Image: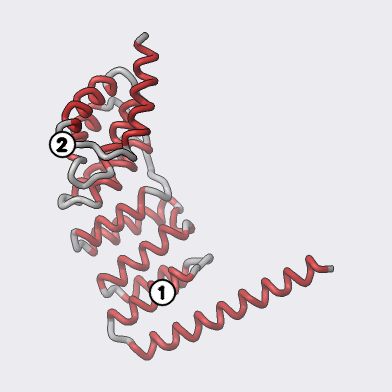
Amino acid sequence: MTTNLIESMNGVFKGIRNLPVTVLVKPTYFRMASLFAKRDPSSIFNLLKFYALSPTNIFKVKDHFHQIHKPTLSHCNLMIRGWSQTDNPIEAIHTYNLMYRQGLIGSNLTYPFLLKTCARISHVFCTRMVHARVLKLGFESVLIVSNTLIHVYAGFGELGFVCRVFDETSERDLVSWNYLIYGYGRCKRYREVLGVFEAMRMANVVTMVKVVLACSVLGE
């Protein structure tokens, strides 16, 4: 009976996110969700997923998160992402430190939100610390991580780091180039902006040549 109730509640967790929840229903729903979260680990994840990604509601599940004996990487990523969007983004850093002390190194979903947190709190040293951790753990090869690094450093006007990360990024996309242009523009290096734009055009030409060659081979 309890198992069926828990399964039903998990179904409610997944479905209710797409429904308009009134002010009167929300408190009742939260109390019910909290009750089932204590009985079933998967319910805890769904509870976090429902509330943590809302900047105004994440405070409601903060205690639930800290009551988890061994939070998983998914739990931590949800909280880091959630806190990074609130008026108290430093909590994302605290969550990451807690996660790392427990032996969870993070994933390609962890570091972009952590870096955005550094940007929101205007802390360039924090960005460098996260960057060092990214290099240590090998996440610099993940495109979304390297692009976020370029963007955050560009926002700080740290052009040296912008160019360094860009040059060390083996696989680049249009976002990478745009963030490099943003970095030069923010530092009022407008001549370099034009140079990067021309280099980007040449890169696109090389890409198109490779595509044409591949198509010709397939045609044979």
Label disc, if present, on residue 29 of the rendered structure: none
Q: Residues within 10 Å of mark 2 (few under 14, many from 20)?
A: few
Marks 2/1 in contact by CB < 8 Å: the verdict is no
Q: Quadrant of the C terminus?
A: bottom right
Classify residue 37 as left or right of residue 147: left
| Mark 2 element type | loop
Residue 70 horizontal/vertical position (percent): 32, 28
| Mark 1 element type | helix
Asked whether the viewer can see residue 49, the reply is no
Q: Residues within 10 Å of mark 1 (few under 14, many from 20)?
A: some
Q: In which quarter of the image is residue 26?
A: top left
Say which of 200 and 47 sits in front.
Answer: 47
Query: Which amino acid lies under the numbered mark 1 shown in the image of this protein?
Result: Asn
Q: In which quarter of the image is residue 213?
A: bottom right
Colour logic: secondary structure
Say which of 212 and 104 sits in front.
Answer: 212
Residue tagged 2: 23
Mark sitting earlier along the chain (2/1): 2
Query: Which amino acid lies under the numbered mark 2 shown in the image of this protein?
Result: Val
Residue 48 horizontal/vertical position (percent): 29, 35
Whether 7 is drawn above or below 21: the answer is above
The residue at the far top in this view is 1
Q: In which quarter of the image is residue 76?
A: top left
Classify residue 48 as left or right of residue 215: left
CA–CA distance in space, label 2 to label 1: 42 Å
Residue 169 horizontal/vertical position (percent): 48, 66
Which residue is at a point 36% across and 52% down the rendered structure image? Answer: 111
Label disc, if present, on residue 178 of the rendered structure: 1
Q: Quadrant of the N terminus?
A: top left
